[in-house]
Amino acid sequence: MASIRVDDHELEVEEGRTLLQALDDAGLLMNGVDVPHYCWHPKLAIDGSCRLCQVEIEGFPKLQIACNTPVKDGMVVRTQTEAVRRAREGVMELLLINHPLDCPICDQAGECKLQDYAFEYGVGQSRTREPRRALKKSVDLGPTIVFDQERCILCRRCVRFCREVPKTGELGVFNRGDQSVIETFPGSELDNPYSMNVADICPVGALTTKDFRFKIRVWFLEDVPGVCTGCAAGCNVWLGTANNKVYRYVPRRNDAVNETWICDHGRMTYQQIGSADRIAHPALRGEDGILRAASLDDALAEAAARLRRVLDATGPGALGVVASPHASNEDLAVLRSLVDALAVEGAALAVRQGDSDEILVQAEKAANATGARALGFGDPAALLERLRGGALEALLVLGHDLLDPALLGEGDALDGVGSVILLDSHHSPLERAAHVVLPTRHAAEKFGTLTNHAGRVQRVRPAVEPAWAAWSEGELLARLGAALGLPDFDGKFDPRAVSRALGERAPAFDGVDWDSVGDEGLPLKQGGA
Amino acid sequence: MVISEDTRAAIEREIGKYPQRRGALLPALHLVQQEHGFVSPDSMRELAGIFELLPVEVMEVVHFYNMFHDRPRGRHQVHVCTNLPCSLRGARGLMRQLESHLGIHAGETTADGRISLGHEECLGACAYAPMLRIGETYHENLDAEQAKRLLDGLE
Ligand code: SF4
Ligand code: SF4
Ligand code: FES
């Protein structure tokens, strides 16, 4: 360990770390100790090319770049001296010589490091009269990204990202000096499953995603912390919201989960939140076989009546329950209470499977399969067998992951089931078999916790309100329990209270609840999952 | 395969001279350019395979040095040194004269494919500035008229 001093902060640092890394490790970088930087990124190799991070170190005759200077025991560093300030001004002046200064039409404006640092360290006026270099303003780099050559400050973050993270290496710096431009190899594109991260790490407005550009000014967005629901990785995201709408996901740094990245597929799943295929109201199937909108009370009463008929006539053995890996731990705790109160055996979990990779993406395409298993929902094989054998007269099913080709496939096996009660957020072929449909909320519309593939419990909160009728599964099931007249069901659902009580139901959740996990999450207790 | 067996063998011999394979990339680029007159994207891809690099990394090197060309060039390569000492002795004016004489800009090739004109960084002939290079031959202490005559004499 090395003891160093940076301004007024005494730090104990692991040997071999550089100054910027040490400040980042201590959580001080741009959060107590301001060392502006462009090329350095906590999760990429060091480049040392922008020269903005220069600091004064006692005993060194010249300023040093903090990003690539290893700490040494006894080092005394000053980041706010006159010499440092002038060096920053100088670097900013050089970077701005050729910058187009088209902030009024630039998507990055408002979250641009060039703007921020020019404001903070710029000299305010230009000493050059020569024309700025004129380059291409809109280069189509591939399916997801557009590049503005004039805005690029050549920090090489995007180049390093492609080589180091997806390891596809599509981008390079071609030419030299003031002719340098970022380009792809002739005839190839920037196209990999993580490509859109380059727009996040680009400190300026040079790289923008086709999806988000020109949609909205970023200062209108409120960033709500949340979790991607695209797979079991549970990557942390900021939901950029305005006008009760989610405009984008961007990665939220969590070194224990997704570092500073998200996959492109996950990034685009924000579109599911306000999509046209949301189930927008409760529905009941009429005598004529047509599904029609209904009030929640009528739908719940019908669901309760159908379940009651089967329970009274045949018993709980004729009722199947399928949990959704998209529901929160709290929702599923209510489902567990309902299942136990009805003495239903073999409540199962259906999870749609897909591709996985070595970086983030997990095969289970849902955010809370691990939580569902921790709450006792297990393998669906036995349930499917009973279903196919015609032993089930009623099915209470959450979500439509049952349609996975490895499980039900297109869902025809449900046609013979007398009563299918479906709780779901999006339309699917499963509705064809449903007698009662109850619309549920997306994770971006409710309080709750989700357990990722590694057993980390992470919380979500309402970022938007659905503009139609939708309830969390927990609330619908609490009301269904009350409609069934079950003791302990008063029809009320307080997710944070349920969260605090999760430990009583599954010891792995002991002390791991909505409030205690914070915005970075906490692992389930060992041996619990 | 666009790089010939002979050139490949020569590249392997160069690689043997360096502690790491990639050390021989510059000599290899020279060899390929000797063979084809330029380094095409296809050759860059093949070189990337030989050197275990990304194609873009090879391309970055090709673009960094202006003695490498990524597209076909004229029969004669004319390079005017426009570095500081030559410029102080009138190299930029010389370049402008040659540009208008040939009707092309530096970096371009005449329509008949006869001459490619280009800037060159220091060629180590500062004492004889201004100067230019045609292929591998230096022509020094030039004035514009001499230089134009030289170019007119090229086949
Ligand atoms: S495009 Fe952005 S990330 Fe890439 S080098 Fe330019 S400024 Fe840096
Ligand atoms: S890896 Fe999974 S959780 Fe992470 S962004 Fe992609 S889909 Fe979302
Ligand atoms: S951040 Fe240190 S040189 Fe760019």
Image (cartoon, grey):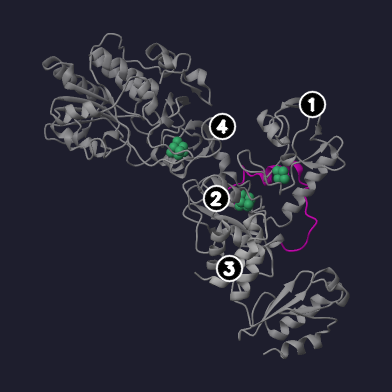
Q: Earlier in the sequence, mark 4 or mark 2?
A: 2
In depth, the one of A147 and A54 nearer the eye is: A54
Circles 4 and 2: CB atoms closer than 8 Å: no
Question: Where is mark 3, residue-wise?
Answer: B9
Tags 4 and 2 on a common chain: yes
Circles 4 and 1: CB atoms closer than 8 Å: no
**Magenta region: which residues?**
A106-133
Q: Position of residue B37 (x, y in %)?
A: 61, 76
Distance between mark 1 and mark 3 Cα atoms: 61 Å
**Of discs 1 and 3, which sits in the foreground?**
3
**Of discs 3 and 4, which sits in the foreground?**
3
- State left or right for residue A506 relative to residue A42: left
Q: Secondary structure at mark 1?
A: loop
The chain containing the residue under callout 1 comes to A
Question: Where is mark 4, residue-wise?
Answer: A255
Residue in the image at 43% along x and 30% along y: A453
Residue in the image at 57% along x and 44% along y: A200
Q: Residues within 10 Å of mark 4 (few under 14, many from 20)?
A: few
Q: Secondary structure at mark 4?
A: loop
Where is residue B51, by image quadrant? bottom right
Question: Where is mark 2, residue-wise?
Answer: A208
**Of discs 1 and 2, which sits in the foreground?**
1
Distance between mark 3 and mark 2 Cα atoms: 45 Å
Residue in the image at 44% along x and 29% along y: A452
Circles 1 and 2: CB atoms closer than 8 Å: no
Q: Secondary structure at mark 2?
A: strand
Tags 4 and 1 on a common chain: yes
Q: Earlier in the sequence, mark 4 or mark 1?
A: 1
Q: Amino acid at mark 3?
A: Ala
Whether the magenta-drawn stretch holds residue B81 is answered as no
**Of discs 4 and 1, which sits in the foreground?**
4
